[in-house]
Image (cartoon, rainbow, N blue to C red):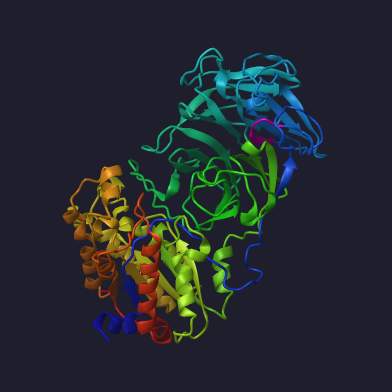
Amino acid sequence: MNAPFAALRRIGCLIVTLVVIGPFAPQPAAADDSAPMESTVSTFAGSGRAGTADGRSGNAEFLSPVALAEDRSGVVYVADDEAQRIRAIDPSGYVRTVAGGGETDSSGLHVAGSFRNGAASIARFDLPSGIAVRSDGALLIADRGNHCIRLVKDGVVSTFVGDPGGRGGVDGSREVARFNEPIGIAIDARDDLYVADFGNGLRKIDPAGNVTSVALPKGRGLAITQVSVDSASTPRLYVTLETGLARIDIATGATVFFATGGQNLPDQDPLPHVYVPGQHSIGHPFAVAPLADVGFVYTDPWSQSLRISFDTTVRTIAGPDGENAAFTGGMYRDGTGNSARFASPTGLLRMPDGRLLIADTNNRRVRVCSIPMFRKTAWLDAMSRAPDRYRIAYVGNSVIAYNTSPERTIGVALEKGLNAGHASLPRPASVFSFPIIGSVTGIGQFISEDLATGTADLVVWQLNATEIASLQEIAGGNPRGVYLSADPNTWRPPFDAALRSVVAACREARIPLIIAINPLAPQLSPGESWYGKMYLDDHHSFEHYEADTSLILAETRKMGIPTIDLTPAFERVERQADHPSLFASINYHYSEAGSELVANELLAALLREHPWRSKSSLPESKDR
């Protein structure tokens, strides 16, 4: 037995080296009452035919439903933007037009926008894109094409704030304030309005009509799409932008940012570390329905799906199970879970009974989803309530399950290999995959606080330079173009601190830890890293990156942590005459061959060293 693995017997830790960047949901090992129930999607209103006809829910027509709101009596309001109408669905299911109008053009798919105040039946809008209900029952409409906020009260439409004659970004009183394509709107318990002003950012309107701008995270852009307000113990705003989703504490302004597609952008402000493990990256949120202190549900038009983020987990609960449905497109299908289909799901509303309404824009329908009975710790419960299985928590960033079906992930391949009769496991293995978007600090926090509590029997942590380079302490906080050898002193202290914390937590819980370190594409070969050089403005030479893996290994070994380096396996394949590409052609995630290589190497290491044998005999030892 080599020295590193001898140390495993002393401190219960094993470290492996790997690279990852996106999230995947753990598979419950056993069907019990801790596992979430499957969601069900059905049609709430709309025939799917293009038109503006009112009527019973199954006969009514929409052109482009994009936003939803509900009043205290249970009436659901729909902003039908291409129809230039505000529609209402009463509790009996009847659909009627409450404001706006106009004839469809020759295509039958569009009504020309215009502006007119007055009686609701003769009033006109130009792309009404957001809707909220005030405490007195009045409707407030984000009239995007007219660059103003409209008020519908007592059957009359008026201009609440803004000037339909011109766009702008001026704050101030109702008379002087200007907007630039207000696309979304939300209201809090005090009747303060928050407006997603597409051309300006986030704006706030108090009940008197005074407008102020709300600061958004720097470096994230101003292309805002929607805003929501939750009813948590500490009320927060959820703001969706082209670059991701910002959660803002209304009282303090404290912000947490979730980047789209799992790409960590540079933080110019000291935002806290964020980790988002689960089945996917955060994706591309459009509209958000907060779940108070538990998490949030959101529509993702890129993946044509409905997703949920709760208790550090991101999961698709309805629609196709992938990161990007651009090539498959949308379609209409009611059904359960991943069998349901949407076509550009946009607006979202959580009803008092917990069901979700979705503005299924291109299907010209409003859909309803009965979401699973998620508890705050549902996925971790699935592990803790499976004592008949040997529970392996497989933690990393997104490459462990990026843009792939669950049955083709590294975790599933590892589980199959362990259960093939070759391992001396105390019980059949179940591998729960937790891909995480974040730095070493965030991932370490997740392991220490959520996994090293007796929940898991073994933790396998895939670790690479991306998680280290994304530490806030590195200049710019941007892994693109930031190589570890540039200034090791910027990342070594937080890296060492995170590792010590995880080792201590796992030792206390008597849980073996395996950290896997594998090379990133630019650390492996110049050929595998052409994408970064071409598209990421990552023009540093191969020699800059080649040293990164050895630097990580040196740190773990200096601390006395057993380490398995996967780089030799990658290099062995890379040197073959007819070698397969080990990374995707469009990013630094694994190809299918790369995922297979990782799964095989991890399996071989586990079968060779049997870390599960060390759990019951871990002595106390001092940190080095």
- Please state if 3 lies on the left or on the right of 290 as rendered: left
- Residue 324 lies, with reference to residue 49, above or below; the image says below
Camera sees residue 134: no
Instruction: Determine the image quadrant of residue 558.
Output: bottom left
Magenta stretch, main secondary structure, is strand
Residue at the spot x=49%, y=22% of the render?
A: 180
Q: Is residue 200 visible?
A: yes
Q: Is residue 530 magenta?
A: no
Front residue of 367/497: it is: 367
In the foreground, 527 or 239? 527
Quadrant, the N terminus: bottom left
- Quadrant for residue 593, please give it: bottom left
> What residue sits 59% from the left and 63% below the top?
378
- Does 380 sit left or right of 611 as displayed? right
Counting every numbered tag in the picture gives: 0
Q: In this orientation, which residue lies closer to the viewer: 280 or 219?
A: 280
Which quadrant is the C terminus positioned in?
A: bottom left
Residue 134 in percent (x, y) is at 67, 31
In the rendered image, residue 47, in percent from the top left (x then y), is placed at: 74, 37
Give the x, y percent position of residue 277. 47, 58
Picture residue at 67% right of the left edge, 48% below the top? 333
Residue at x 42% of width, y 57% of height: 398
Give the residue furthest to the front: 578
Q: Is residue 200 left or right of residue 62?
A: left
Q: Which residues are magenta?
A: 62-69
Front one among 403 and 457: 403
Q: Percent position (x, y) of residue 228?
A: 57, 39
